[in-house]
Image: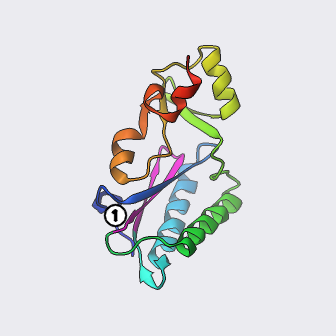
Amino acid sequence: MLTDFKNLPDDSRIWIYQANRKLSDDEVAEIEKLTEEFLTKWTAHGAELEAAVEIKYNRFIVIGLNQANASASGCSIDASVHFIQSLQEKFDVDLLDKMNVTFYSGEYIAYKPLADFRKMAKDKSVSKNTIVFNNLVNTKAEYLENWEVPATESWHNRFLS
């Protein structure tokens, strides 16, 4: 069952998929439509899942699930990953590689392999105050409060001296 992202409770589970490039407005519109169609049919053991999608900065697909009525099962999570894989193929974009870092570089959003981010930290090209996207947040409340944070407040801190 599809709902509006803002209507999800704060304890809703979320998954964030970051794109390795900025998506065009046309791609965002199509991805949003396809994701809404998927979420409309998404179930766990026959129970409808109340879910929503939000696409941020033409780069992040955020799927939220209200677990009060029904929680995602292994099979429903597999189905969502298969769906994301289908988006990767259709749009020739990487959405599942967790070994990359997305952060603000001035007013722009940069996407770098983790090794490059480490080197940038060593070279002082990024600092503890660099705003990073912490895609490891688990709930809507964490997403709203702790997703865009200074590197010192995220797992990225381990690379800063």
Q: Is 22 situated above or below 87?
A: above
Asked if the magenta segment contains residue 61, the reply would be yes
Residue at 53% x, 73% y: name it: 76
Q: Is 91 situated above or below 135?
A: below
Residue at 60% x, 69% y: name it: 78
In the picture, which quadrant includes the C terminus?
top right
Q: Position of residue 140 (x, y in %)?
A: 36, 53
In the picture, which quadrant includes the N terminus?
bottom left
Q: Position of residue 84 (x, y in %)?
A: 61, 62
Q: Furthest residue to the bottom?
A: 46
Residue at 66% x, 62% y: name it: 85
- Under mark 1, the amino acid is Asp
Picture quadrant where residue 40 is located = bottom left
Residue wearing tag 1? 4
Indicate the colouring scheme: rainbow
Stretch in magenta: 51-67
Q: Is 32 situated above or below 102?
A: below
Q: How many numbered callouts?
A: 1
Q: Position of residue 73 (x, y in %)?
A: 50, 73
Asked if the magenta segment contains residue 28, the reply would be no
Label 1 element class: loop
